[in-house]
Image: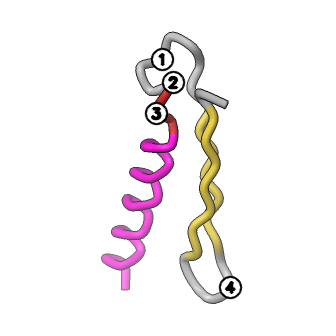
Amino acid sequence: MNGICKSMVGVSDSTALYIIVHANKGNPDFVTSCRITERVAEFVIQNLKAAK
């Protein structure tokens, strides 16, 4: 379904990040909503690595 994308990323042995993006029709990211979940996951992982 366009406009909705869900991704789950393991961030440790016991923790996962679940990202949901819901872009409405008319939003330029409607057909590429999974790109947003990828960018969010990358951002979180980079910040977790930097926090160590």
**Which mark identifies residue 30?**
2
Residue 3, quarter of picture:
top right
Whole-number angstrom distance, CA of label 1 to CA of label 2: 5 Å
Q: Which residue is mark 3?
A: 32
Check disc 3 and report its element: helix, strand or loop. Answer: helix
Q: Earlier in the sequence, mark 3 or mark 1?
A: 1
User: Label 3 to label 1, Cα distance in Å?
Assistant: 10 Å
Image vertical order of residue 39 relative to residue 32, above or below: below
Q: Residue at x 49, y 27 (%)?
A: 31
Of the image marks 1 and 4, the number of the one nearer the N terminus: 4
Q: Provide the residue designation for mark 1.
A: 27
Q: What crowding class fits label 4: few (fewer than 14 Cα within 10 Å), some (14-19), or many (20 or more)?
A: few
Residue 49 percent coordinates (x, y): 36, 79
CA gap between label 2 and label 4 equals 32 Å
State yes or no: discs 3 and 2 in contact (Cβ < 8 Å): yes
- Report the amino acid beneath label 2: Phe
Q: Answer yes or no: do the residues labelled 1 and 2 have beta carbons within 8 Å?
A: yes
Earlier in the chain: of badge 3 and badge 4, it is 4
How far apart are labels 3 and 2 at the CA level?
6 Å
Q: Look at the image and say whether residue 1 sits in the magenta stretch.
A: no
